[in-house]
Image: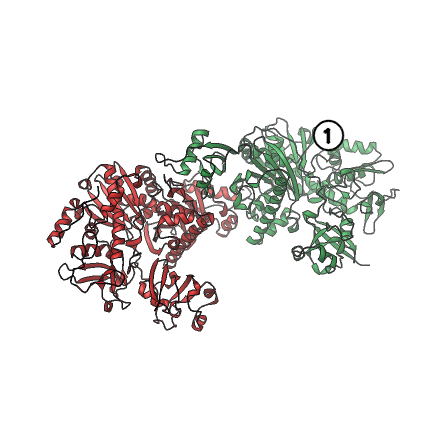
Chain colours: A red, B green
């Protein structure tokens, strides 16, 4: 029977199913996260999906769907996955409300202490009412009280506070609380004493994932954290495609901005739902992201930052009123996008440096923030260099046959017995395996290499005598989980193509690191500390990453994982004005290294495609380990 | 046959016509300005009016109207005045497009010289394109050029300039012009060299009339002027009624703001139509008006400035971005509302003081800005006091039987022969007389008094033997123009009630002046100069105004008319930053006198109802003149 391709957004996953299969079957095959309680009986109405493209290729709306879905949902293209059969290629979007919600947030990062000094201060004011002998204007009365009672001078009112100010002052009997931004601007005036309500929102806008944190600005503590997929994925998985989409015209540029703002608002809404905080009590937001995400969030034309010589539109931190970009914190609240370093080294790198404190360390430190775009910063308190590389979304589970997000049932750790080739793994929440997420995607090639199931080129060793290695029809594959262990009832495998994707991703990262070493004229031995950051959180195994050659062979004792350090930096800047100043300094101090200018980049990249690298001499410990396990890496001569 | 009342808006005029009359007949009777070319034949479609209230009291839509009016107009309530019969009381609005357009603008005022130094400066910038060795951000490149080429430091970009900045810079080959506000904020960046395009908009928001001026900020000259009726009139003719309407709730407050902004935008549109200026080339607007108009324009709750102790919401000059209040100059342009003095002494008074330069004069000067609200400021460079009084719209032609706006056909000068009682008059454009406008409304009681047709109480001398004095059915009246001289074919008269309205208006003004004299403990002799300002322009006869006792009896040689000096001050502030500083100083320096606090106010007001005043001893010259003419004013003893 004919097979048809189903593409899931915003995950970006694809699967092939037999013509006439339901979308729910496709969802299971693809390992996409979709809630279903009744198991396809058309009762729970949980498996709502939206047909985005080629809507004619699915079965017509069934009577049960007509009954269960509201007219609004139907006209918005909603269907129930269990009642929708596919007859041709379709693109289906999984709306957030249909997710299981058990996704690991991947918002965890180190906590770097900072002195609490948020830009938003709240000031309680008690004023006398006007009399015939004191006809001071309402505005001057408030400003006078701010100066007399709080020493704040030359403040400016945000215009939109003024229209109803007179009523508010009188209804509150001249006892109000002002929220003041940066000792400059009055964001709002509230009735009575509301000093204990002062919140901020920090976000890390990743190419694939968004992380959001609600902070109490009175304590500096996180009160809730949430994450979502970046809704721009359907416009392109990597930054280049999105830059090119936005470059088509202002309409497209606006569109990319609006979807990202809508998702950041949705995260905020969830954070507010979890707590008793009201949107108008969130007075400031700090955003970080790579330069493309930064520009698209601020609706700045990203075309030229994507073309040599890659000048960003704005480099310094920029403050915008929330209402000007549609963020639904207090409309007069401030949105600070932290400074960027260059067209491809963004506010997330600045934030990484702030959080990891490289800028004040004596020892030379290498920070790698792994993501769809990987940012690399190297240096210490004397100097810093940085670059970024398009590593692709493989480590976020995309482009991998059984890859998935870090949700319930995702295989997150893999060990392969070097003798028996038996696989042991751990899933998130110890649920039945659904697919493979980022940390295991790093483990698998390392384990396969150590077990001799693949060679340094990444090709399967077809001479191997194990049922796990087999030809899957299209290509060779290795079974990680047998069908009786999986949620879908199908084997979870890693294919030759998957391995290639992983090798390309880690090669890009390594080549970036190598370029920085070359620029700084230093060797592996000079690096005293390696910090691995990224949405992986703390789950990546630094040893596996080293075995596959993602970074130079540095003693494992010097390597740590720091989680989402970009998010950590955003939170630090949210609660500390000094941290913001530091960010501006970091943005000036990090020297941007343009990889395209490095004549050796291409050959370094090619060598790094091998496991761990074609230049084996630089991986003595790894070679030693492989030899101990009976593997004798043999290679073509490295490209020089 | 029964008579029905027709009320015309925004003029606020009322007339009674026989049931079954057409609206065109009512228009003619009321002396309202309405275009009609075909003379009621249903051909020209010029006499379009809108039925605002009691729509059921007019004849149904005729076939000719259905043919001539578009569906949009019909659904908006438009009718042709010549084809609409009235069968009950109705309120009819004359839309601006149906006006003859020959209305005298009443925007004329003195020209007080000022050193040209507008807040908006335009700076041409030539920048190098980015290279691999110079990846400065686009924003920093522009800011750097502004500093290096124009010495402007620490400027801030308006956010909305940024989204498309990169494209603009490249399309203009890195040669652009920046419009910078107050050496602080970049309003916009334009392609190429546009230094010669720099315009500003000054407005005087009167309770009854709006005056607008388009200025070339490179020369400081007015390039066009326009005026319109204040569209808030239907919400109340005086400021108290409008304050009370706005006080009903935010919806009503917004509504009053939106109509005034719409009319100011309409004036702007006409100014732009007359010239080749584009809205985006108008970078700043300066607005003046009394405190109620100021608050309603800025959408500031006016309730409490209207209640004792009358504190304004804001006293200092306030700068708002045009888009925040809906003004359709450049959306990032600045709108400056000049400072006010108190709840009832507004930015128009500040502007009067600026324009008349009282604040730097040695001689004691009295400025009276006559309008629906009359602002009075007295003082010199050492001290100033000010007050305002609700004089009502009589001098703007409202509440006077044959009163009208200063348009073609309005009687603007009246002389009455003291012997024959013959009337000679002059009309605007020497057209057939349609009604009586402000300057003649001041002349008539003065001339009637001198001719002995009325006594000091303002009552007609019924013993007079002239066909001009007659009982008109309802009350006594005096014919100013016979029907064969008038456009409507009906006599133009002034009635006993009209005289009462004029007396009340001038009494309010005099009582305000008297209160200031008392506050300052000075007498008439101390006043060295009287300046009469207002929408009258230069047309009022100071001698007539003195004869009726609008101001104290001061030698006529010391009295001048200065026209719309509030508009003059607005224009000065638009082209000079120093003038703005002066306004802030004036706002602080003028001492506000609250008339309600003066225990003698009521008796002074009652005495001032007489012509010239019940305290005749204070009017020796006027008494002398009247005696010379054979009149022997006799009075009840003045109230003390």
- Looking at the picture, tell me which residue is in the foreground, A209 or B417: A209
Q: Helix or strand or loop: what does disc 1 sit on? A: helix
Check the image and name the residue furthest to the right: B465
Crowding at label 1, few (<14), some or many (≥20) Cα neighbours within 10 Å? few
Location of the N terminus of chain B by quadrant is bottom right
Percent across and percent down for residue A437 are 27, 58
Which image quadrant is residue B503 in? top right
Q: Is residue B195 left or right of residue B81?
A: left
Q: Nearer the viewer, residue A238 or B20?
A: A238
Judge whether A89 appears above or below B426 on screen. below
Q: Is residue B277 in view from this perspective?
A: yes
Residue A180 rendering spot, x and y as whole percentages: 42, 45
Indicate the position of residue B138 as horizontal and vertical percent values: 41, 38
**B417 lies left or right of A561:** right
Please tell me how many numbered marks the rendered image carries: 1
Question: What residue occupies the far top of the structure in this picture?
Answer: B362
Query: Which chain hosts label 1?
Result: B
> Which of B442 and B508 lies nearest the eye of the viewer?
B442
**Could you tell me residue A260's position as x and y percent?**
40, 52
Q: Quadrant of residue B619?
A: top right
Q: Is residue B346 visible?
A: no
In the displayed structure, B440 sits above or below A497; it is above
Quadrant location of the C terminus of chain B in the rendered image: top right
The answer to whether A351 appears left or right of A480 in the picture is right
Going by the image, does A178 lie left or right of B301? left
Q: Which residue is mark 1?
A: B556
């Amino acid at each position: 029977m004919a097979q048809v391709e189903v593409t899931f957004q915003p995950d970006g996953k694809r699967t092939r199913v037999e013509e006439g299969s339901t979308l729910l079957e496709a969802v299971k095959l693809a390992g996409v996260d979709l809630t279903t309680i009744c198991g396809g009986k058309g009762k729970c109405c949980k498996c709502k999906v939206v047909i985005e493209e080629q809507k004619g290729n699915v079965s017509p709306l069934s009577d049960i769907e007509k009954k269960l879905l509201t007219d609004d949902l139907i006209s918005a293209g909603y269907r129930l996955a269990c009642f929708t059969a596919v007859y041709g290629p379709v693109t289906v979007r999984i709306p957030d409300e249909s997710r299981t919600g058990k996704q690991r947030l991947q918002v965890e990062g180190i906590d770097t202490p900072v002195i609490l000094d948020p830009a938003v201060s709240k000031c309680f004011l008690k004023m006398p009412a006007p009399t015939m002998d004191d006809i001071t204007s309402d505005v001057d009365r408030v400003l006078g009280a701010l100066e007399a009672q709080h020493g704040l001078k030359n403040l400016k009112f945000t215009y939109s506070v003024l229209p109803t100010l007179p009523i508010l002052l009188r209804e509150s009997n001249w006892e109000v609380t002002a929220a003041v931004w940066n000792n400059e601007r009055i964001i709002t005036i509230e009735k009575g004493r509301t000093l204990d309500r002062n919140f901020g929102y920090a976000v890390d806008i990743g190419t694939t994932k968004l992380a959001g944190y609600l902070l109490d600005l009175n304590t500096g503590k996180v009160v809730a954290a949430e994450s979502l997929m970046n809704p721009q994925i359907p416009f392109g998985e990597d930054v280049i495609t999105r830059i090119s989409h936005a470059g088509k015209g202002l309409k497209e540029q606006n569109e990319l901005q609006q979807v990202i703002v809508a998702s950041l608002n949705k995260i905020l809404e969830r954070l507010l739902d979890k707590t008793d905080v009201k949107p108008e009590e969130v007075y400031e937001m700090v955003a970080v992201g790579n330069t493309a995400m930064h520009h698209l969030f601020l609706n700045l034309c990203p075309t030229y930052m994507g073309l040599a010589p890659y000048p960003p539109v704005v480099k310094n931190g920029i403050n915008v009123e929330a209402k000007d970009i549609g963020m639904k914190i207090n409309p007069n609240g401030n949105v600070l996008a932290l400074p960027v370093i260059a067209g491809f080294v963004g506010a997330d790198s600045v934030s990484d440096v702030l959080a990891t404190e490289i800028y004040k360390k004596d020892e030379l430190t290498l920070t790698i923030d792994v993501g769809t775009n990987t940012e690399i910063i190297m240096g210490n308190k004397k100097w810093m260099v940085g670059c970024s590389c398009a590593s692709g979304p493989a480590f976020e589970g995309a482009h991998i046959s059984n890859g998935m997000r870090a949700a319930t049932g995702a295989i997150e750790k893999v060990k392969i017995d070097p003798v028996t080739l038996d696989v042991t793994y751990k899933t998130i929440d110890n649920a039945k395996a659904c697919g493979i997420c980022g940390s295991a995607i790093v483990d698998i090639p390392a384990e396969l290499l150590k077990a001799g199931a693949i060679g340094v080129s990444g090709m399967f060793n077809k001479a191997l005598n194990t049922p796990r290695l087999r030809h899957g029809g299209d290509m060779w594959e290795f079974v990680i989980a047998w069908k009786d262990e999986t949620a879908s009832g199908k084997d979870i495998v890693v294919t030759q193509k998957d391995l290639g994707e992983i090798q390309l991703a880690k090669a890009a990262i390594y080549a970036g690191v190598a370029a920085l070493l070359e620029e700084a004229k230093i060797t592996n031995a000079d690096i005293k500390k390696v910090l691995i950051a990224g949405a992986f959180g703390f789950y990546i195994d630094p040893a596996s990453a080293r075995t596959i050659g993602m970074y130079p062979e540095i003693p494992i004792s010097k390597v740590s994982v720091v989680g989402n350090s970009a998010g950590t930096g955003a939170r630090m800047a949210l609660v500390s004005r000094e941290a913001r100043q530091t960010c501006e300094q970091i943005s000036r101090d990090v020297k941007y290294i343009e990889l395209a200018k490095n004549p050796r980049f291409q050959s370094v990249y090619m060598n790094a495609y091998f496991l761990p690298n074609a230049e084996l001499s630089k991986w003595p410990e790894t070679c030693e380990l492989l030899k101990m396990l009976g593997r004798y890496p043999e290679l073509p001569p490295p490209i020089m």
